[in-house]
Image (tube, grey):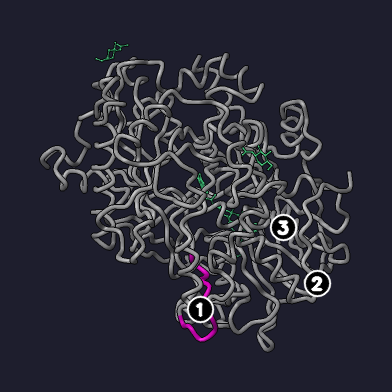
């Protein structure tokens, strides 16, 4: 049965190279019944020197929201430019999230070799997947919908970013949301009737029940972590529509595909922002499409939504960045700003496998590849609907939590996966993580195949990291991937907090809920850590440094601060300090990473950005949620 998954994999990887034909047949394959809100946007190629009111660079989590909200003003003509093409039938399948990162839908960025993370991966290098497709990283992501703690946003406001406190951003979280979880429909923390569908995976993993009971045994409530309290155990809320991925492209772009004032140029790479160096005003962008170079003009603004890597890189190649570094790269500086600094991310430890004595509890390759699962999926049900395989989330506080006088604020998250790396017989998860086959066999080959299938994982995530990285250019050419130094665990407290997460997981496994199935840790030592006493703190520090990987939440490279703060790149209105006509609205503006998965925060940022832009151009707020034009 593995051949089914394997052939899907090959079909997709090959077909995605031939985009236009592929757009056509994957559209046909999108499951019926077709929702009238869904359908691909047509592609538009701008003519050289064509003028638009606004040009949005990047149709990712933020870009799709911006395009929707700004075209609510009928007299504004908008161009949305995206390097990738359409999503498809496969990218809709929630459990296959990891596998998308092995396809051309990923930009395939790598980190510089890390000192304290990814040590045993290919060349000490961490993979940093980013979406290159309409919907951006919301197409590659694991669908988890999580907002963070109120203090995360109150901190932004305390840094001087007026308008960004929790009470001011909560309405924007709610605005985009269409909560479909019946028990939360009346919650004051959730929104109804927005574009973005939030639901629980229709599939209930048998492990979910154990996870809930384990949490209760340890004194945690089973709750809505996007509600009043964050700390506790829960079932993941997901950006999902009837068991399928609800990317921002599906949510925000497809229903407005007939708006006449919106043009979307796909397979188009922006190489440069056009800036008048005397007035420091941006007036357009230069893009490459089908080998042709096209310049388009923005009458009002250029808005960067190219993500934490793309936006920072585009600014720098266009002369906006640290002066010294730009000169090194032979770029004439226009505005001296600390672009690329303040790079923050969430790191997780994903090598542990827990073995249960009952094969009906876990989700593995075999179950995922079975025809029954495929049939269930077509009806919007079954194990393929598990968001990236995740079946439980917990938020907790370690003794290393920063002393912020906020005992309700978590610093460690636990993500329970329905399967584990040990059960990755086909090697898809391994390719995502960058784990070598050699490593895999050294770790797990002592387990019989059958037992490898009876494993699941609980991974700790460091959600309030102290370590900070930096992104730099390798050259002045946008096509050259930037040099990205993550500096994971640069602050030793980060490592200690994550070890504490491992200890908490051991407590979860030790509960009678999990012991009912004789749950135990697979205790073959990690390669490279054999000489350290097994299960000592030093052992786990070693294991984490060998295999810690990113949760793909890179943020912060174009930090938002009030004017006059030398660490900032954009203002609280998201305009580039010292410039005109240029804004950034995506994950890169985040001044301090929230204790959350970052998709929902980015969508919130884009919702708020759209209102800021409307205000600045004298337009009244438009808060409709409607399907029009069709
Ligand atoms: C594998 C993975 C798993 C994740 N899991 C989760 C999760 O479960 N939950 C969660 O909340 N978050 C998750 N995230 C993170 C979340 O998806 C991102 O933080 C969020 O999507 C970032 O949004 P963005 O708009 O800043 O950037 P993106 O969504 O990455 O959008 C940037 C867009 O700009 C385009 N672009 C870039 N440069 C150019 C250029 N020069 N010209 C034209 N187009 C360009 C890109 O192709 C892309 O479409 C995950 C991310 C990844 C990669
Ligand atoms: C939500 O509120 C409505 C109207 O007040 C009520 O009829 C309904 O039962 C409530 N639903 C839940 C799940 O509490
Ligand atoms: C798993 O272990 C429990 C407790 O020892 C036992 O009751 C149960 O029958 C076992 N299940 C299987 C499938 O062996
Ligand atoms: C940038 O690099 C790409 C790929 O290496 C190359 O095709 C392109 O010509 C370069 N652009 C410039 C302006 O040198």
Q: Magenta region's main secondary structure?
A: loop
Ranked by sequence position, the earlier of labels 3 and 1 is: 3
| Residue tagged 3 | 81
Q: Which corner quadrant holds the C terminus?
A: top right
Dot 3 crowding, Cα within 10 Å, few <14, some 14–19, many 20+: many
Seen in the picture, residue 468 relative to 534 is either above or below; the reply is below
Q: Is residue 77 left or right of residue 213?
A: right
Q: Secondary structure at mark 3?
A: strand
For ligand 1, tell me if the residue under mark 3 lies within 8 Å.
yes
Does the rendering let one see residue 134? Answer: no
Residue 573 percent across, percent down from the top left: 63, 74
Give the mark nearer the N terminus: 2 vs 1: 1
- Residue 492: horizontal and vertical position, in percent? 23, 60
Please check the rendered image and state whether residue 561 is part of the magenta-colored stretch, yes or no: yes
The numbered mark at residue 304 is none
Say which label, 3 or 2, has the lower sequence index.
3
Q: What residue does disc 1 label?
A: 160
Secondary structure of residue under mark 2:
loop
Q: Residues within 10 Å of mark 2 (few under 14, many from 20)?
A: few
Identify the residue position indicated by label 2 in the image.
619
Residue drawn at (72%, 30%), measured in percent from left and top?
A: 30
**Along the line of sight, the residue nearer the viewer: 624 or 592:** 624
């Amino acid at each position: 049965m593995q051949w089914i998954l394997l052939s899907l994999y090959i079909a997709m990887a090959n077909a995605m190279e031939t985009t236009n034909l592929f757009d056509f047949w994957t559209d046909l394959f999108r499951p019926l019944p077709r929702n009238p809100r869904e359908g691909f946007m047509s592609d538009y190629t701008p003519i050289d020197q064509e003028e638009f009111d606004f040009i949005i660079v990047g149709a990712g989590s933020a870009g799709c929201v911006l395009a929707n909200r700004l075209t609510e003003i009928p007299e504004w003509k908008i161009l949305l430019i995206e390097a990738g093409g359409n999503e498809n039938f496969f990218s809709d399948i929630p459990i296959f999230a990891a596998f998308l990162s092995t396809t051309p839908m990923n930009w395939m960025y790598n980190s510089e070799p890390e000192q304290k993370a990814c040590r045993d991966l290919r060349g000490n290098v961490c993979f940093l997947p980013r979406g290159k497709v309409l919907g951006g990283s919301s197409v590659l992501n694991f669908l988890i919908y999580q907002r963070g703690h109120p203090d995360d946003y109150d901190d932004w406001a305390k840094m001087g970013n007026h308008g960004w406190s929790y009470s001011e951003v909560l309405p924007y979280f709610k605005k985009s949301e269409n909560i479909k979880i019946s028990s939360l429909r009346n919650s004051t923390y959730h929104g109804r009737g927005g574009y973005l569908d939030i639901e629980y995976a229709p599939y209930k993993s048998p492990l979910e029940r154990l996870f809930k009971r384990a949490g209760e045994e340890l004194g945690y409530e089973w709750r809505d972590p996007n509600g009043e309290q964050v700390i506790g155990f829960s079932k993941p809320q997901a950006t999902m529509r009837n068991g399928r991925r609800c990317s921002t492209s599906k949510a925000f772009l497809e229903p407005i595909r007939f708006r006449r004032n919106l043009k979307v140029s796909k397979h188009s790479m922006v190489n440069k922002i056009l800036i008048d160096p005397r007035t420091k005003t941006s007036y357009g962008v230069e893009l490459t499409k089908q080998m042709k170079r096209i310049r388009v003009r923005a009458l009002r603004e250029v808005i960067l939504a190219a993500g934490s890597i793309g936006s920072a890189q585009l600014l720098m190649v266009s002369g906006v960045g640290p002066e010294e570094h730009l000169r090194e790269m032979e770029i004439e500086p226009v505005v001296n700003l600390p672009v690329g600094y303040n790079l923050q991310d969430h790191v997780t430890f994903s090598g542990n496998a827990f073995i249960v004595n009952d094969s009906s509890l876990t989700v593995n390759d075999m179950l995922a590849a079975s025809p029954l699962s495929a049939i269930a999926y077509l009806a919007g049900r079954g194990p393929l609907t598990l968001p990236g395989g995740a079946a439980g989330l917990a938020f907790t506080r370690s003794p290393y939590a920063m002393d912020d006088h906020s005992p309700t604020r978590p610093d460690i998250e636990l993500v329970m996966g329905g399967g584990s790396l040990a059960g990755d017989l086909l090697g898809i998860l391994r390719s995502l993580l960058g784990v070598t086959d050699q490593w895999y066999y050294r770790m797990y080959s002592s387990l019989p195949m059958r037992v490898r299938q009876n494993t699941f994982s609980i991974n700790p995530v460091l959600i309030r990291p102290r370590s900070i990285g930096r992104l730099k250019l390798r050259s002045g050419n946008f096509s050259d991937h930037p040099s990205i130094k993550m500096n994971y665990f640069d602050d030793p407290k980060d490592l200690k907090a994550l070890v504490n997460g491992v200890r908490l997981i051991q407590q979860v496994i030790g509960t009678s809920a999990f012991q009912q199935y004789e749950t135990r840790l697979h205790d073959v030592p990690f390669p490279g850590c054999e000489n350290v006493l097994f299960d000592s703190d030093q052992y786990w520090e070693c294991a984490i440094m060998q295999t810690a990987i990113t949760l793909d939440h890179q943020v912060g490279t174009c930090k938002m601060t009030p004017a006059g703060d030398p660490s900032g790149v954009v203002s609280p209105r998201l305009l580039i300090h010292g410039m005109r006509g240029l804004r950034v609205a995506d994950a890169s503006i985040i001044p301090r990473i929230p204790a959350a998965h970052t998709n929902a925060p980015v969508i919130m940022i884009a919702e708020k950005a759209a209102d800021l832009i409307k205000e600045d151009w004298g337009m009244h707020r438009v808060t409709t949620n409607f399907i029009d034009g069709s």
